[in-house]
């Protein structure tokens, strides 16, 4: 986790503690992501 936090800081990426509301609304998923999520749920 420490290495990941340093990498995020070095890259200048904004880190969010929560994933809801306005921030979550900006995330777009396509068919690939939906198929992957469904596959994981059914053991695929």
Image (spheres, grey):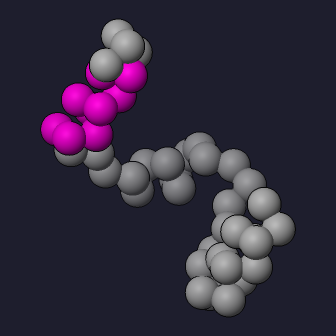
Task: Please say if 22 is above or below 36.
Answer: below
State the extent of the magenta-drawn residues as a range. 31-40
Q: Is residue 14 left or right of residue 42?
A: right
Q: Name the quarter where the C terminus is drawn.
A: top left
Residue appearing at x 53%, y 56% in the figure? 23
Q: Name the quarter where the N terminus is drawn.
A: bottom right
On the image, the x and y values in percent for residue 33 come to 28, 40
Please tell me whether residue 12 belongs to the stretch shown in magenta. no
Residue appearing at x 60%, y 79% in the figure? 13
On the image, the x and y values in percent for residue 12 come to 62, 87
Task: Please say if 36 is above or below 32.
Answer: above
Q: Is residue 20 left or right of residue 29?
A: right
Q: Of residues 44 and 35, which is closer to you in this image?
A: 44
Q: Is residue 42 visible?
A: yes
Residue appearing at x 68%, y 89% in the figure? 10
Task: Please say if 36 is above or below 6.
Answer: above
Q: Is residue 24 left or right of residue 40?
A: right
Classified by dominant secondary structure, the portion drawn in magenta counts as helix
Q: Quadrant of residue 29?
A: top left
Residue appearing at x 69%, y 49% in the figure? 18
In the rendered image, the residue lying farthest to the top is: 42
Please tell me whether residue 38 belongs to the stretch shown in magenta. yes
Q: Of residues 36 and 29, which is closer to you in this image?
A: 36
In the rendered image, the residue lying farthest to the left is: 31
Q: Is residue 38 visible?
A: no
Numbered marks: total: 0
On the image, the x and y values in percent for residue 31 come to 17, 38
On the image, the x and y values in percent for residue 32 come to 20, 41
């Amino acid at each position: 986790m420490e290495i990941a936090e340093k990498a995020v800081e070095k890259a200048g990426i904004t880190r969010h503690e929560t994933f809801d509301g306005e921030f979550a609304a900006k995330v777009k998923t396509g068919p690939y992501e939906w198929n992957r999520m469904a596959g994981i749920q059914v053991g695929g």
